[in-house]
Image (cartoon, rainbow, N blue to C red):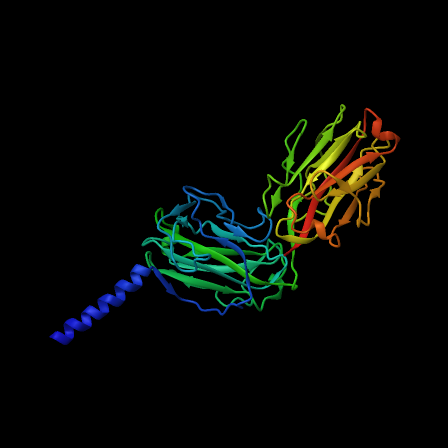
Amino acid sequence: MKKTITLLALLSFLVFSCTADRDIKDTTVVIDPTSDLIHYWNFNTITGTQTLVNPDVTLLPLGGASISYPGSGAGYMDTFTPGYESNLQNTEVAGSGLRARNPSDTRNLVMAVPTTGYKTIVVQFATAASSSGAQTQNYSYTVDGTNYSTEGLNTTTFNSTIDPIASLVSLDFTSITGVNNNPNFKIKISFTGTNASGTSGNNRFDNVTVKGIPVSTTPLYLLHYWNFNNLATGTLTNVNADTSLLSTSTATIKYTGTGAGYMDQYTPGSALNAQNSDVAGLGLRFRNPSDTRNIIITAPTTGYKNVVMKFATARSSASGASIQNYSYSLDGVNFLTTGLATTTFNPNIDPTYDVITLDFSAIIGVNNNPNFVVKINFGGTEASGISGNNRIDNVTFQANHI
């Protein structure tokens, strides 16, 4: 009898330990220890119903990676608590998680996870279902953003455990070369089983990670990016970057000076130098008189080096300023052209755009500089006119990590 009681006690301890930890690993994939955490969702800062969830951590531009739940019917995404401990990163706690509510057979959970600059990709997440949630998750992926496949995928289906016991799912894309360095890479999770069409129940996800190895030993990051596609109408005084690895509020464009010149939006913009498959939406124009004003582009490089700036540009017509002059500042006040290969350009007339490259990679003072600024001023007889303008679009600052 004593042996029986001891055995029952031991079994109870083991069951309680597994349940209390809330996590059981079901799939095992060995991840290269040199891999970077490219994207990470811990869901700890969101509450309530969600339509699109951006990652909590990403090495690529914000807005590129996301989780959504497209389809039809009454199903939707919201949060649940407590989340799971499995696959937590950066010493974080099990806060909240994301759940996809039934009916789920008419929807798909879509993870847009661009891998630009990375290869040998592994995606992992903790998952479980409520008691009436869909029993089966099905996994596929796309390399063109549209057409989905399971070819080469180690795990294509999984039967979820019931909350609070979560499982760790690992999707190994290391042998699928089309996933590497791919801005259009997405993963789709569809739901099946008799419960999937129900009006209650859900599947739950937490701690989604995308890890990979840099394609080169010195990966190039999109530090700041303006596509201008969300510009407001009317006169603009300050335009923040659309995406930034630092802060969109510190990366800004202004048109400083005196006189009647001002900046506003124009349409259509240019597709040249567009990133992340962005369309040629809007662009930014600088109206004459422009000889009394300067374009001031504040682009801090804190933590980055080997900076290269690019942008598409043109002028409105023969009345737009015919000369653009480029300089930079290391202290935010004094401007110079030392070491800059391109210091002037004669823009073509819209719709003929050119991409200008300003290479600061050899200028050491630009590296890791919170005060870095680029200035564009205008010359030519047209610059003092009362009509005409210069136009820019898709401004990028790319750099390497220090």
Front residue of this view, candidates 150 and 94: 94
Residue 180: x, y in percent?
62, 62
Q: Residue at x 65, y 59 (%)?
A: 219
Front residue of this view, candidates 186 and 33: 33
Query: In the rendered image, which quarter is residue 24 located in?
Result: bottom left
Q: Residue at x 58, y 43 (%)?
A: 247
Q: Is residue 114 above or below residue 215?
A: above
Is residue 33 at least partly visible in the picture?
A: yes
Residue 364: x, y in percent?
72, 53
Q: Residue at x 80, y 27 (%)?
A: 289
Image-based side of 127 in relation to 351, left or right: left
Q: Outermost residue toward the right?
A: 381
Q: Is residue 54 above or below residue 249?
A: below
Front residue of this view, candidates 113 and 188: 113
Query: In the rendered image, which quarter is residue 257 located in?
Result: top right
Q: Outermost residue toward the left?
A: 1
Residue 330: x, y in percent?
71, 44
Quadrant of the snapshot with the C terminus: bottom right
